Image (cartoon, rainbow, N blue to C red):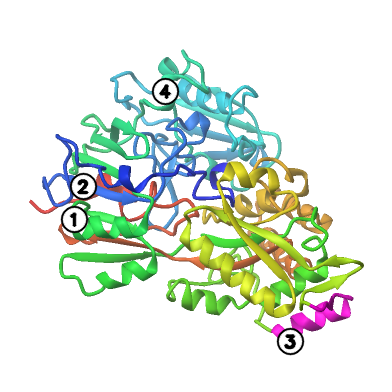
């Protein structure tokens, strides 16, 4: 799915120039960092492509402008939001019934009702709607309103993690239903039931919010909240030092200098966020199972964690982190360059005069693309290429925009990212299901494994935890036998925030981060010093 795809940070691909970023939050009337006690300005690296939940915005929660039927607490457990309680599940897992919270209003004062829920889900599933994540609702057959405060979802089949899908934000039918869903004003000037209202979106510069005084959960204490969009890591840190930002997401090498700062606190959020190299089947080299297996054991993941992440992360052997209960013990791949070379030797990939291996007249070389300006991906790509070179495989590292990269994905390798802590289905199905190959940024490697396909279907349709674990064990073991991707690292997200906001918390975070995650995942609950 595009919004959580392995292409980038939640599909957030906008490039922000240094000149523009340096002016963010500096216009008259803005609350600069360290200014008004009831204001906060934080620095993030990317901005959304849209602010409409009908097109994918906020689909994993924490959108600030909107609410879903359910939301996640600090421990990532589901709890009611627009729903008055967790759903009643019947019909062998094919019917979910929600009672809605009464008295909720959109920020324009209009009442929230069941019709808005039905409108939101039906619009997302409409073929005319350009929502790249609509396949996430593939199990949904229909949704109906039961009066003003009841909603019933009917599924085509028992879909174990369906409740997790209902964190999806609800849009107001009386506004969004009266305009073009793909191009209307609602995409940039949204109205929701959330704790904040959008004041202005200055594209490439900042998102400015104000507290919703009529929020059903109570008016936030932080009255003005600004997200400054600053793509350059160094400039984000500089502006934090200058007091222009109250908080920022930073890479490990920049975040570590604040460890002993008396005015700021560093937060390390554990994540499911991984970096990975796609190995497309359409390429004669990367499509060779033996080349894949050799690269899988011939790249030094620990060195990447130590040197690139400064220890703020862990080695990755698949989409599931090694400390997750869903991880299959025994599928770790120890770095072994000698073993990798033997795999290639035995498979007939012999070193040529220039040191690059050959087989059947084909040289063991392929391009590896990463997103321009993404230093973390660049570092991973270069480290991967360096390790591959020692095996006799030439990896040609190149950078480009997603517009340049996407058409090349069927045959060229890509340094991607992904990760979702909500449910193992969310990552593994879209990443590995053969039928999704070529569907946007789903299954970018065109991975095709019948055993994996079968296990993925079994896992998503079973409500039994042990049965699901067995299925995902199968998936992870198959990735050892035939790794269509080389998973490299799982990355901790590091944030630095002014201590005047008190002791904050983070959630276990997905690949999408900065915008909806970080210590400001619950900024509406912050209690700034008086």
Q: Earlier in the sequence, mark 2 or mark 3?
A: 2
321 relative to 433, above or below: below
> Which tag is nearer the camera, tag 3 or tag 4?
3
Q: Vertically, is 51 above or below 324?
A: above
Residue furthest out toward the top? 178
Mark number displayed over residue 338: 3
422 relative position to 361: left or right: left
First to last magenta residue range: 337-353
How far separated are the C-alphas under marks 1 and 3?
A: 52 Å
From where the camera sits, is residue 481 visible? Answer: no
Q: Earlier in the sequence, mark 4 or mark 1?
A: 4
Residue on which disc 2 sits: 40
**Residue 350: quarter of image:** bottom right
Q: Are marks 4 and 1 in contact (CB under 8 Å)?
A: no
Q: Which mark is residue 501?
A: 1
Q: CA distance from mark 4 to mark 2?
A: 25 Å
Residue 198 vs 93, above or below: the answer is above
For the point 28% across and 35% down, which residue is it?
196
Label 4 residue SS: helix
Check residue 141 for magenta coloring: no
Measured in 3D between alpha carbons, the distance from the residue under mark 1 to the one under mark 2, in whole angstroms, is 9 Å
Picture coordinates of residue 439, whole percent (x, y): 70, 40
Mark 4 to mark 1 CA distance (whole Å): 32 Å
Q: CA distance from mark 3 to mark 4?
A: 57 Å
Q: Nearer the viewer, mark 4 or mark 1?
A: 4
């Amino acid at each position: 799915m595009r919004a959580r795809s392995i292409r980038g940070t939640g599909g957030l691909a906008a490039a922000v120039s240094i000149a523009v970023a340096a002016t963010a939050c500096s216009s008259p009337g803005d609350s600069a960092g360290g200014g008004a006690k009831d204001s906060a300005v934080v620095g993030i690296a990317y901005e959304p492509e849209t602010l409409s939940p009908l097109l994918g915005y906020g689909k994993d929660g924490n959108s600030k402008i909107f609410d879903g039927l359910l939301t996640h607490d600090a421990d990532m457990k589901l709890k009611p939001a627009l729903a008055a309680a967790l759903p009643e599940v019947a019909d062998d897992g094919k019917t979910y019934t929600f009672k809605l919270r009464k008295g909720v209003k959109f920020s324009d004062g209009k009442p929230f009702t069941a019709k808005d829920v039905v409108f939101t889900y039906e619009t997302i599933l409409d073929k005319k709607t350009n929502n790249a994540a609509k396949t996430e609702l593939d199990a949904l057959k229909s949704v109906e309103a039961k009066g003003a405060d009841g909603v019933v979802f009917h599924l085509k089949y028992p879909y174990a993690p369906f409740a997790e899908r209902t964190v999806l934000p609800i849009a107001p039918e009386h506004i969004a239903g009266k305009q073009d869903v793909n191009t209307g004003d609602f995409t940039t000037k949204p109205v929701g039931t959330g704790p904040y209202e959008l004041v202005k979106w200055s594209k490439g510069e900042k998102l400015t919010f104000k507290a919703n005084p009529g929020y059903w959960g109570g008016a936030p204490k932080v009255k003005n909240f600004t997200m400054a969009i600053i793509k350059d890591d160094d400039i984000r840190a500089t502006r934090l030092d200058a007091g222009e930002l109250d908080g920022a997401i930073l890479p490990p090498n920049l975040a570590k200098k604040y460890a002993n700062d008396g005015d700021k606190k560093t937060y390390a959020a554990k994540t499911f966020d991984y970096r990975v190299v796609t190995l497309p089947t359409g390429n004669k080299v990367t499509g060779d199972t033996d080349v894949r297996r050799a690269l899988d054991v011939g790249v030094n993941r620990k060195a990447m964690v130590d040197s690139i992440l400064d220890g703020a992360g862990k080695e990755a052997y698949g989409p599931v982190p090694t400390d997750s209960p869903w991880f299959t013990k025994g599928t770790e791949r120890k770095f072994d360059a000698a073993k990798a070379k033997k795999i290639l030797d035995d498979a007939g990939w012999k070193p040529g005069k220039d040191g690059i291996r050959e087989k059947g007249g084909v040289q063991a070389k392929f391009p590896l693309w990463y997103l321009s300006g993404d230093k973390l991906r660049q570092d991973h790509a270069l480290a991967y290429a360096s390790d591959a070179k020692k095996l006799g495989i030439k990896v040609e590292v190149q950078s480009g925009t997603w517009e340049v990269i996407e058409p090349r994905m069927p045959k060229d390798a890509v340094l991607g990212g992904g990760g979702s802590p909500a449910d193992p289905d969310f990552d593994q199905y879209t990443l590995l299901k053969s039928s999704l190959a070529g569907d946007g940024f789903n299954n970018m490697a065109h991975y095709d494994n019948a055993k994996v396909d079968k296990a993925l279907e079994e896992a998503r349709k079973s409500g039994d935890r042990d049965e699901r674990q067995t299925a995902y064990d199968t998936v992870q073991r198959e990735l050892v036998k035939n790794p269509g991707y080389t998973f490299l690292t799982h990355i901790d997200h590091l944030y630095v925030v002014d201590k005047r906001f008190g002791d904050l918390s983070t959630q276990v975070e997905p690949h999408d981060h900065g915008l909806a995650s970080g210590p400001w995942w619950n900024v509406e609950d912050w209690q700034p010093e008086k």
